[in-house]
Amino acid sequence: MILKRPLGEKGQVVIPKDVRELLGLKKGTEVIFEVKDKEVTIKTERKKNSEEILKRFFNTIKKKKHLTLEEIRKTEEESYDLP
């Protein structure tokens, strides 16, 4: 999805409603701006989610000696964008 928005007088940009809903952004939600080269990525804080994912992953390892490829892929997909 590619969207354009004008920069306001105070340097502000409104995040489109569709994007806010897709990312679950609500009033007061903190976002992270990551700048690399000349690109900006906006992310939500996922600290709690990453802790939960890691806890579940390590609990699974304790219970099983062998993980299936599907379980490893699922964990990788869930943790792909972790900071």
Image (cartoon, helix red, strand yellow):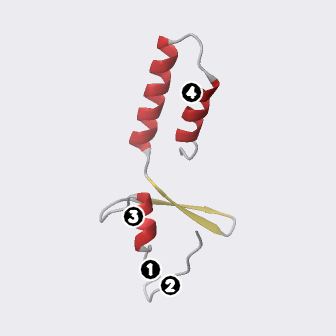
Q: Do the CB atoms of the residues marked 1 and 3 lie less than 8 Å apart?
A: no
For numbered disc 4, what is the local secondary structure?
helix
First in sequence: mark 1 vs mark 3: 1
- Determine crowd level at label 1: few under 14, some 14-19, many 20+ residues with C-alpha closer than 10 A: few
Q: Do the CB atoms of the residues marked 4 and 1 lie less than 8 Å apart?
A: no
The alpha-carbon separation of the residues under discs 3 and 4 comes to 29 Å
For numbered disc 1, what is the local secondary structure?
loop
Residue at numbered disc 4: 71
Residue at numbered disc 1: 12
The alpha-carbon separation of the residues under discs 4 and 2 comes to 44 Å
First in sequence: mark 3 vs mark 4: 3
Q: Amino acid at mark 4?
A: Glu
Disc nearest the viewer among 3 and 2: 3
The alpha-carbon separation of the residues under discs 3 and 2 comes to 21 Å
Q: Is residue 79 visible?
A: no
Of all residues, the one furthest to the bottom in this rendering is 9
Q: Amino acid at mark 2?
A: Leu
Residue 4 at what x, y percent from top left?
A: 56, 80
Residue at numbered disc 3: 21
